[in-house]
Amino acid sequence: MKHMVMAVAALALVIGVAAGGCAKKQVSRVDVGETIDLSGRWNDTDSRMVAEAMVSEALSRPWVDKHLKQHRKEPTVIVGTVVNRSHEHISVPTFTKDLERELTNSGRVQFVASKGEREELREERTEQQTHASEETAKGLGKEIGADYMLKGEINSIEDEEGREKVVYYQVTLEMIDLETNVKVWFGDKKIKKLVERRRFGF
């Protein structure tokens, strides 16, 4: 009986150690620019690459030079609404921030704060009129209005058969003249992914 109890205890210990081993996690740091596709869904790499490609394409079109020639200053742009009409959750704020970064860093356009950011900045300027010294308080009514708004949407199509799945994304963006509503640029970027499931999981 004593031997049986010891055997059961030893077996329990082995199972416990094995279970503990299976539950271990390994976490490592990777370069933020590295492409890692785990699920095949839209990810940070897609967001960054699409934003870079589309802003580069938009700024290479004639509307920028036309504006410079007509107004003798770089166009002022704001990013408006980008609607996610795809079949999956996509972090649209991350994508619009990628667009804002590319526009700002391009040096070809002037970029103004978004609607939400402007509210905070106006509140700060209003408070400065009362609480800051006259020499340092920033004046009211000196904002620069945007000339163009960048809007767009993200769509997707999914096709699945057996262990294979094809996911197709199409991002369309439009640059619209805020005064005339004229669309001065229209562009799209497509991504197609083939996801293959292994026989014993991913």
Image (tube, rainbow, N blue to C red):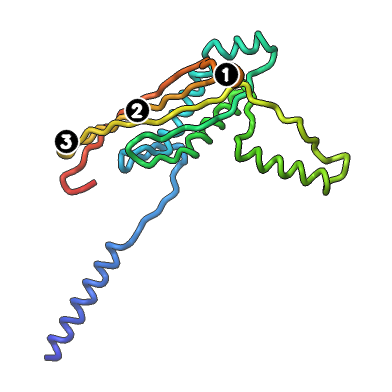
Q: Residue at x 54, y 10 (%)?
A: 62
Where is residue 177 shown, x and y percent of the image?
Answer: 57, 18
In the picture, residue 19 is in which quadrant?
A: bottom left
Circle 1 packing at 10 Å, graded few (<14), some (14-19), many (20+), is: some
Image mark count: 3
Instruction: Look at label 2 and name its amino acid.
Output: Ile
Instruction: Relative to 22, say whether 143 is above or below.
Output: above
| Alpha-carbon span between mark 1 and mark 2 | 28 Å
| Mark 3 residue element | strand
| Alpha-carbon span between mark 3 and mark 1 | 44 Å
Where is residue 134 shown, x and y percent of the image?
Answer: 88, 41
Q: Residue at x 50, y 39 (%)?
A: 93
Residue 166 can be seen in this image: yes
As drawn, is 28 to the left or to the right of 68? left
**Residue identifier under label 1:** 177
**Residue identifier under label 2:** 191
Q: Quadrant of the N terminus?
A: bottom left
Tell whether label 2 touches label 1 (CB within 8 Å). no
26 and 137: which one is in front?
A: 137
- Mark 1 or mark 2: name the one nearer the start of the chain: 1
Where is residue 192 shown, x and y percent of the image?
Answer: 31, 28
